[in-house]
Image (cartoon, rainbow, N blue to C red):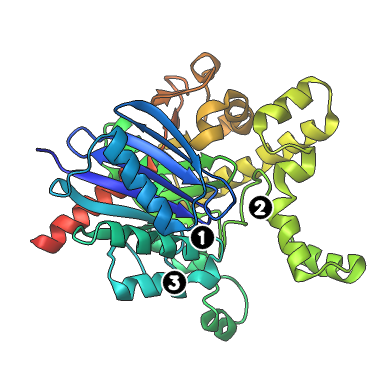
């Protein structure tokens, strides 16, 4: 009988999950419990009985996990703990502590909690999910897989900020990056599409969703990424500004009387495409452009400009580029963004085939011309599968 992994992604008010069969690497069931702690919670489970939706109050993550177990029990597939090799947990911030996945015990769970100042919206929720899942599956190994781990191979020149060294060391200020499981999965799968070992391939990965990041992957190792101490830096995102002159914050503090919380809210929740166009959904932005909205048009040009800037910079750092891979919600589904963000880069050997690029892509797709020196792919990401793979590998190694 094949091994299974339950992958858990706990948010502040949600638990997302997948049960993955490792022989086929296919999801046997997926679901989410959301609105935890609010008056009315909601659970959706897709298993053997199709889709099941449940609405009820969910007090906390412990109760949320109990609902997950009941959904498996009532609507399948049944979770057989003898086949469950691991429960894999997505953890956003591993700091400089975790360069790879970790078997969860009380020490590791406390270390994840201690890193909460670097990810105050994420790590406390992960700890709540870990606690609930460890209670639900006390005899199964639990593995923490960190978004930041893949970026731990960056050299000091890439991760160091040019501020007072003692201050930076005291408060752990450096570039950590995010979306690491996605960048790892996509970069390695892109090498497979080229028929090469990841150690032989240089790839630029563009993870474009409501949150967006780019990475430069040299021989299977990340050497640079666009997000920084937090997921705010880098590309233009749905409601996040990405890169900005820090003096803008000083100016707004002095001239507009904005507080630290005001500025945090501005850059994380009122900026990006929302701030520029009034929309966070790229489909709405395209509709606005089609209707003649010049603000929306400018917003897209800013978005494309920032993407091309990172592609050019990473091209320079890598020396040569074998492939560019688009992934995540926008990267996989928005042919307009793919086309326009690569426009004008033909002199770098990046030539799209507009017919291949057209439409949404649900499978791996080559979208460059046959003679394009740099191959451009759409590669649907699968962070849950990457977490499951890393969990199995760690558990297996720990038992040898």
- Choose between 66 and 130: the one closer to the eye: 66
- Please report contact status of discs 1 and 3: CB closer than 8 Å, yes or no: no
Alpha carbon separation for disc pair 2 and 3: 26 Å
* Residue lying at the far right of the rendered structure: 255
Please identify the quadrant where the C terminus is shown: bottom left
Question: Is residue 158 positioned above or below 97 on the image?
Answer: above
Residue identified by numbered label 1: 122
Left or right position of 315 against 64: right
Please identify the quadrant where the N terminus is shown: top left
Left or right position of 233 against 111: right
Question: Is residue 36 positioned above or below 369 on the image?
Answer: below
Residue positioned 43% across, 21% down in the render: 371
Give the secondary structure at mark 2.
loop
Q: Earlier in the sequence, mark 1 or mark 2?
A: 1
- Choose between 367 and 15: the one closer to the eye: 15
Residue 75, image x, y percentages = 31, 33
Residue identified by numbered label 2: 242
* Residue lying at the far top of the rendered structure: 355
Residue positioned 56% across, 40% down in the render: 209
Residue 32, image x, y percentages = 44, 42
Which-is-in-front pick, marks 1 and 2?
Answer: 1
The answer to whether residue 78 is visible is: yes
Alpha carbon separation for disc pair 1 and 3: 10 Å
- Please report contact status of discs 2 and 3: CB closer than 8 Å, yes or no: no
Residue 65, image x, y percentages = 37, 52
In the rendered structure, find residue 113 and report the number of the disc placed on it.
Answer: 3
Residue 7, image x, y percentages = 33, 48
Give the secondary structure at mark 3.
helix
Give the secondary structure at mark 1.
loop
The answer to whether residue 187 is visible is: no
């Amino acid at each position: 009988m094949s091994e299974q992994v339950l992958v858990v992604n706990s948010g502040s008010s949600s638990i997302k999950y997948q049960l993955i069969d490792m022989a086929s690497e296919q999801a046997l069931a997926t679901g989410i419990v959301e609105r935890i702690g609010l008056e009315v919670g909601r659970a959706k489970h897709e298993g053997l009985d199709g889709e099941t939706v449940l609405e009820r109050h969910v007090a906390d993550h412990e109760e949320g996990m109990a609902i997950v177990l009941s959904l498996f029990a009532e609507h399948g597939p049944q979770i057989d703990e003898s086949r469950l090799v691991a429960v894999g947990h997505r953890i956003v911030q591993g700091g400089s502590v975790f360069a790879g996945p970790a078997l969860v015990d009380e020490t590791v769970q406390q270390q994840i909690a201690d890193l909460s100042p670097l990810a105050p919206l994420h790590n406390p929720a992960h700890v709540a999910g870990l606690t609930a899942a460890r209670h639900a599956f006390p005899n199964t190994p639990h593995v923490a897989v960190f978004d930041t781990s893949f970026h731990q191979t960056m050299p000091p020149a890439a991760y160091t900020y040019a501020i007072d060294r003692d201050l930076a060391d005291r408060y752990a200020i450096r570039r950590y990056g995010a979306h690491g499981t996605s960048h790892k999965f996509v970069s390695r799968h892109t090498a497979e599409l080229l028929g090469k070992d990841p150690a032989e391939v240089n790839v630029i990965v563009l993870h474009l969703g409501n949150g967006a990041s780019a990475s430069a992957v040299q021989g299977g190792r990340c050497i640079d990424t666009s997000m920084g101490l937090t997921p705010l830096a880098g590309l233009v995102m749905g409601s996040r500004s990405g890169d900005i002159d820090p003096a803008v914050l000083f100016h707004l503090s002095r001239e507009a009387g904005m507080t630290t919380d005001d500025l945090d809210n501005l850059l994380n929740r009122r900026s990006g495409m929302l701030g520029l166009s009034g929309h966070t959904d790229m489909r709405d932005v395209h509709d606005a452009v089609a209707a003649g909205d010049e603000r929306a048009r400018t917003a897209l040009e800013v978005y494309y400009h920032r993407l091309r800037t990172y592609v050019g910079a990473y091209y320079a750092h890598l020396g040569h580029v074998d492939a560019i891979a688009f992934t995540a919600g926008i990267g996989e589904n928005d042919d307009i963004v793919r086309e326009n963000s690569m426009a004008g880069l033909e002199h770098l050997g990046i030539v799209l085939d507009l017919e291949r690029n057209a439409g949404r892509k649900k499978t791996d797709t080559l979208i460059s011309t046959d003679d394009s020196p740099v191959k451009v792919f759409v590669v649907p990401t699968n962070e849950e599968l990457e977490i499951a793979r890393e969990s199995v590998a760690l558990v297996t190694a720990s038992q040898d």
